Amino acid sequence: MKFDMGRAWNEATAMVGANKELLAVIAGIFIFLPNLALALLVPEMMIGPAEVNPEDPMAAFQAFYADNGIWFLLLGIIQSVGTLSLLALLHDRRPTVGEAIRTGLVTLIPYIAAQILLVLGLSIVLGVPVGVAAALGGPAAGVLVGLLAFVVFAYVMVKFSLVSPEMVIGANLNPITALRNSWRLTKGNSLRLFGFYLLLGIGVIVVGIVISMISGLFVAMLGQNTAGLLVGGALSGLIAAIWSVLIVCVLAAVYKQLAGPSAETVSEAFE
């Protein structure tokens, strides 16, 4: 089946409109509130590291993430449950919020397993050649092979972009099968999907930069106190929630288009 960008976008926005109240509840619980809490627990996230050595600017950021890694890990887990729960809401059988959250929790471990398999595979297939090229051919060879590896990385990520909807909407909790099915569903549409994701990603990045500047301005105006962090964290959490809902609906729309109608939809058509 040839992927239709316009149809996918229209179906994604229609999903947002048809399920906005339920989507807002889950996005608020799993995306907005955790981001707001993180802004209060890790204020450096909004204002940056306190001291940056001009001779080694990366050291401060490395220390920042080392000191606060547990919070970012916890945020990632919570948001993963939220993303999977959002996808569950878009199932054709239309579950309740409670059922969707239960689906998100049940799917979490298989989803993490699939991501670990993907990371390990990419590390071996891409990381090893880059390291060998840099060691044997010097920095120039490492950079050249690194650029080629980035192209392959982008291609692979497109091929496996439907793992989460395959697990939730397709009800397939086998990580290996989910990875394989995502690859199969995207066959013949990789370039179209890449272009679609690229346009969406550019929009996310541009809006994210603007919002970061605005939230940083609020923090600077209100001062590095609770009020400033609350406003900045609320703005950051709101945008994260909105984009999470939109991206989840896009993935659901892409999956449903390429996978075809579910058994529930087919049975309803003949009732």
Image (cartoon, grey):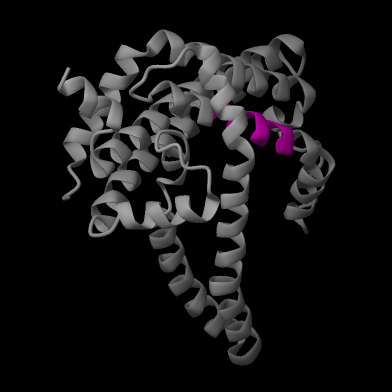
Against 234, is 147 above or below? below
Residue 7 falls inside the magenta stretch = no
Foreground pick, 255 / 63: 255
Q: Is residue 207 left or right of residue 189?
A: right
In front: 168, or 141?
168
How many numbered circles are shown?
0
Q: Position of residue 175 (x, y in %)?
A: 54, 51
- Camera sees residue 39: yes
Residue 46 spot, x, y in % from top left: 68, 28
Whether residue 66 sits left or right of residue 81 in the image: it is right
Q: For this view, does 203 lie left or right of residue 141?
A: left
Specify whether 49 is left or right of 204. Answer: right
Residue that sits furthest to the bottom in the current view: 136
Front-lying residue, 223 or 82: 82
**Magenta stretch: helix, strand or loop mostly:** helix
Q: Residue at x 28, y 23 (%)?
A: 13
Residue 215 visible in the current orientation: no
- The x, y position of residue 60, in whole percent, is 79, 47
Q: Position of residue 99 (x, y in %)?
A: 53, 17
Task: Give the magenta part as a residue range.
Answer: 72-83
Q: Is residue 62 above or below residue 243?
A: below
Tell me where residue 243 sits by quadrant. Answer: top left
* Identity of the residue drawn at 55% across and 58% down: 118
User: Does 220 appear above or below 147?
Assistant: above
Image quadrant in which the C terminus is located:
top left
| Residue at position x 73%, y 15% in the image | 223
Identify the residue at image location x=28%, y=59%. Answer: 187
Q: For residue 64, which quarter of the picture?
A: top right
Q: Is residue 130 above or below residue 81?
A: below
